[in-house]
Amino acid sequence: MTLTPTRPAWPGLDTVPGGARTAVSARVARGLYRSAVRRLGLPDDAVTIHRPDEFFARLGRDGLIGFGEAYLTGAWDAEDLTGFLTALASHVADLVPGPLQRLRPLVLRGTPSHHRPSQDHTRELIAHHYDLSNDLFRLFLDESMTYSSALFDGTTDLHEAQLRKIDRLLDATGVGAGTRVLEIGTGWGELAIRAAGRGATVRSITLSTEQQALARGRIAAAGLADRVDVELCDYRDVTGSYDAVLSVEMVEAVGWEYWTTYFRTLDRVLAPGGRVGLQAILMPHDRMLATRGSYTWINKYVFPGGFLPSAQAIDEITGRHTSLRVVDRLAFGADYAETLRRWDDAFLARREDVLALGFDETFLRMWHFYLCYSRAGFASGYLDVQQLTLAREA
């Protein structure tokens, strides 16, 4: 499907924060930034601050949201953006002194009510990202249109690595001829195609109308429309009984308030003897607790309502509220850093094509920052991605 995207609005970026409060917070931010750069041992030319007054005003007033917004406006640049962000991510827990960290709830904004992924808001939140333009995602994804971490495991080919990731999850959950599969979060259909190619029948649910349309087209082109049904459906409303329940990088969009509901849903629809296969981006448990309920640059510009769980949180929720237990896990965070590098290189190489779709220069900087920001999390080891297999206790 070819879309004509609505050009994103950038409210607030054309106005630099001002006033007495900003002046004070900017002075604090300037001192904290200089101290952090010294402690990290970064070279003087690691970052070029073009407009210092704006940079520190945004950083002081809005923290990491302001830091990212100052990049969007061009107030600062870094020749090696990922390298700079990786250095910051490596010390994210101690960049700000402990006494000041305790003031975080008083200074930073919490998640706006319309960004909470309740049933009333979830479709709108999903559309913010996934309905941007199928053609945009085609520009930087591989031909499988897979928008999650690849599993390289010795290969250097991104497409092969994406298929390897999917096949490992299908193998772990025993998907084969006659298997009844539920997929929560369709993407653009590759997992459903490969499951149906094994002889499974697949019900795949999504809240993205554009993903649904393209996935249905790809499934039909593969000659598998009789085996796969792609529906617009909230995970909370799913019914039926399935031998395998699969969900790739979906739990991150659920919201921490709804993790229990999500895992109870998996438990409810899993048939006796069945298995759940998840791929999840994870953060350290202590940082998850410290940042829960916060409003981040990623929330504002990329994934509204999203929040990453920890491995411990998944274990605790499934242990307390479901009959499911993690029986196998594979961690491959370094592969996500490489996947994101491939996506960013492809995105930058198609700059003119992105502009031709109707996106602007600010969007180019925003998307590049998002990919580098994410890559830095995995390259530093702060973030991980894991495939988890869950089954009921014997």
Image (cartoon, rainbow, N blue to C red):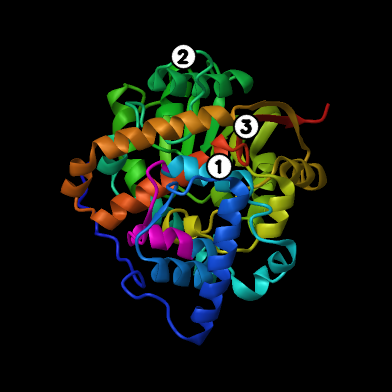
Q: Nearer the viewer, mark 3 or mark 2?
A: 2
Q: Which residues are magenta?
A: 66-80
Local crowd size for mark 1, using a 10 Å CA cut-off: few (<14), some (14–19), many (≥20): many
Label 3 SS: strand
Residue beneath the point at 32% across and 26% down: 143
Amino acid type at circle 1 is: Gly
Helix, strand or loop at label 1? It is helix
- Disc 3: CA contacts within 10 A as few (<14), some (14-19) or many (>=20): some
Cα separation between marks 3 and 1: 14 Å
**Which residue does the image show at 41% across and 66% down from the upper left?**
52
Spatial CA distance of label 1 from label 2 is 23 Å
Q: Which one is nearer the viewer's eye here, 49 or 118?
A: 49
Residue 269 vs residue 298, the one in the foreground: 298
Question: Disc 1 or disc 2, which is closer to the eye?
Answer: 1
- Residue named by callout 2: 155
* Left or right relative to 213: residue 96: right
Asked if residue 68 lies in the magenta stretch, the reply is yes
Q: Position of residue 313 (x, y in %)?
A: 73, 46
Q: Is residue 259 above or below residue 115?
A: above
Q: Which residue in the protein does label 3 denote?
A: 386
Front-most of residues 307 and 30: 30
Under tag 2, what secondary structure? loop
Residue 310, relative to residue 139: is it above or below?
below
Residue under the image location 36 percent in, 46 percent down: 368
For this view, does 300 lie left or right of residue 259? left
Q: Quadrant of the N terminus?
A: top left
**On the image, numbered disc 1 is attached to which residue?**
377
Q: Is residue 180 magenta?
A: no
- Per the model, the C-alpha gap separating discs 3 and 2 is 19 Å
Q: In the rendered view, would you say 267 is above or below 23?
A: above
| Residue kind at label 3, given as amino acid type | Gln
